[in-house]
Image (tube, grey):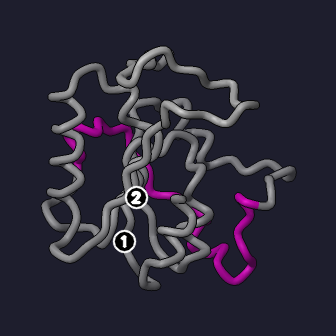
Amino acid sequence: GATTFLQGLDQGSIVADVGCGDGKYFPAIWEAGSYVIGFDMSRPLLKTAFHQSLEVPESRQVSPHRRHLSSKPAVAVGDCMHVPLRDKSCDAAVCIAVMHHLSTEERRIRCMQELVRIVKVGGLINVQAWAMDQEENSRRRFDATDVFVPFN
């Protein structure tokens, strides 16, 4: 998954997390020795990326020797179809659980074009979308293969 992808990046990589929400994958990026720039449309979700409670799940904990990377995450309100970064400015990009929030195929393609634009030639991009087939105990069920999930 995303964590395995992030662990495979070179140390010191600059990673764009497009649609980062609350920064769920920031700890995995920091643990890999990389730097993150997170973007999301939701300012309230971005604000939560700054506040780590004492009861952080093990998967979101940052090792003491990596805490300097996590002291102040670089985040901005941003649209995945118009990412506010220069061309070829990142070594990698992740876009996890975003595509189902984009209402048309054109918007999804535009998002993919933005990811390609901001990542250096030879860089890596990881896009993950919800699957139609879910585990039996999943709370997500889909009636069709192309489903728009409104963000409220």
Q: What residue type is labelled 2?
A: Ile
Residue lying at 73% horizontally and 76% vertically, measured from the top left? 63
Q: In which quarter of the image is residue 98?
A: top left
Say if mark 1 contacts mark 2, CB within 8 Å: yes
From this view, report whether residue 96 is shown above or below residue 136.
below
Give percent across and percent down for residue 6: 49, 69
Q: Name the residue under label 2.
A: 37
Of pointers 1 and 2, the one earlier in the residue sequence: 1
Residue 79 as seen in the image, left or right of residue 114: right
Residue 82 is covered by the magenta coloring: yes
> Is residue 71 or residue 139 the one in the foreground?
139
Q: In which quarter of the image is residue 79?
A: top left
For the residues labelled 1 and 2, the Cα–Cα distance comes to 8 Å
Mark 2 neighbour density, 10 Å: few (under 14) some (14–19) many (20 or more): some
Residue lying at 20% horizontally and 27% vertically, measured from the top left? 105
Magenta segment, which residues?
59-84
Residue 137 is covered by the magenta coloring: no
From this view, report whether residue 135 is shown above or below residue 10.
above
Q: Mark 1 points at which residue?
A: 14
Residue lying at 37% horizontally and 47% vertically, measured from the top left? 18
Residue 56 is marked as none
